[in-house]
Image (cartoon, grey):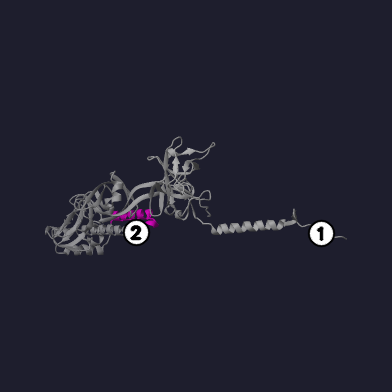
Amino acid sequence: MAVRKRKKNIVRFPGGVHLNIGIVVFSFVAFYIAYNIYSYATAVHVSPYEVEPGTIEVNTSYTGLILRKETVVNASQSGSLDYYLKDNTKAAKGTLVCSVDENGNVSKRLNETVDSSAVLTDENMRDIQASIREYVKGYKDSTYYTTYNFKTDLSGRLMEALNLGALDAISEYTEFARDNQTFHLYRSQQPGIVAYYTDGMEQLTPETVTADMFNHSAHQKTSLKTQGTVEAGQPVYKLISDENWQIAVMIEPDMKRNLQDGDTVQIRFKEDQTTAWAGYTIEQKNGQDFLFLSLHHSMIRFANDRYVDINILLDQQTGLKIPNSAITTKAFELVPDAYFTQGNGSGSQKGLLVEHLQNDGTYSDAEFIPVTVYYEDEENKMAYISHENIKKGDLIVLTGSKERYEISKTARLRGVYNINRGYAVFKQIEEIFSNSNYTIVKSGTEYGIMLYDHIALDGDSVVEDQMITP
């Protein structure tokens, strides 16, 4: 039986040249793969960033100096000192604050009564239980630091209740001492907030504030409740008698410029992240600008403080949010708007009639070159262009006239590289605000970027028309 030989896929060309199709196809595929591997290996890989909407809150941190109306009450006698009102408490006129016992007998008996009976009235218990329930109800792990404030407040409530109860229990004894003028009760002479410390800055006013007062290390605060005894003429408590108070802040020239056209600003207290609106004035002393913020509420929260950390919230800037690393600059030639013309044919790109400067100092015939405008300065009627065939010294022709304009002026624009189409295209940006990491730019600009555009994350790593490999 005869065996039929299989024909090979060979193409015969005139002249006796034989070409194997399989080898040709294999060679083409191998070349294609090798080319792509080479292209990928040698290409510049650029990390993309998708443009998204965003907001940056414009705020600046400051430590402020608190000014308020404070009156220090001094003891008229020497003796043992006892308190009946918890610290940082609103007191009506006539409220019992403390007592001074000249011979110490009443004070000793008062403390013995507190230690022996330590009984709270039903009203005291209800008040303390309500306070505990209110705290537990509003407790959050994020505000754990308030636990210590609550502990101090609760201790003050207990001290107040027990001392008043003990004072009532030995009323006959205290009446005898008062008749003998050895036991003296100190009551609030006007409504206000009672505080048990002094720091020597109670008489501060905007006129007396100086820069060295903002030195925390030099601030000395004296607690009055730890004394136990007092000498005549020494402080026993102070009364803050006005809800109107001020915060003094030392500001920089930039902040002064931001605030100079207004009279109110929003601030945030860092301690608890609450906000408030404050009126303000700016005064300069010895070359330093001081901002005086005026508030009319919430002063009791800071009655025990002389300094307070705040943020000044100027505004919330909204637009397109981009990383600062994407922003770069690019140089452009400047040409007058009037010199642009249209090329031949419908829908052709606008461009310029250019006479190129030759090496011998002469100029070539006018050539139409399509160009892309990257930005237009409407005020000066100048366009920003960039083209490899238009250089400094070339002339551009004003259509229909003999006027020429020499390319000589250049300028730089800030912008980013758009990489939507796989190659880099510079896009000018209009910056609204920036912080250390991000910048908010205006959206909807004619020569800028749009929402969800992809831009090069590192703007300095690419150039115009560069092919981009993610």
Q: Residue furthest right?
A: 1
* Viewer-side residue, 65 vs 111: 65
Q: Residue furthest left?
A: 180
* Viewer-side residue, 231 vs 393: 393
Q: Quadrant of residue 304?
A: bottom left
Q: In this view of the protein, can residue 34 be seen by the observer?
A: yes
- Tell me which amino acid carries mark 2: Thr
Give the x, y percent position of residue 295. 27, 48
Query: 24 above or below 366?
Result: below
* Lateral position of residue 121 relative to residue 12, left or right: left
* Viewer-side residue, 76 vs 95: 76
Query: How dense is the environment of label 2, judged by Cα within 10 Å: few (below 14), some, or many (20 and up)?
Result: few
Numbered tag placed on residue 31 in the rendering: none
Q: In this view of the protein, can residue 277 be seen by the observer?
A: no
State the SS at label 2. Answer: helix
Cα gap from disc 2 to disc 1, whole angstroms: 97 Å
- Tell me which amino acid carries mark 1: Lys
Q: Is residue 328 magenta?
A: no
| Discs 2, 1 touching: Cβ within 8 Å | no
Which range is magenta?
121-143
Q: Residue furthest top?
A: 400
Residue displayed at 70% across by 58% down: 23
Give the x, y percent position of residue 164. 23, 57
State the SS at label 1. Answer: loop
Query: How dense is the environment of label 1, judged by Cα within 10 Å: few (below 14), some, or many (20 and up)?
Result: few
Q: Is residue 135 magenta?
A: yes
Numbered tag placed on residue 147 in the rendering: 2
Quarter of the picture holding the N terminus: bottom right
* Lateral position of residue 70 relative to residue 469, left or right: left
Q: Which residue is disc 1 drawn over?
A: 5
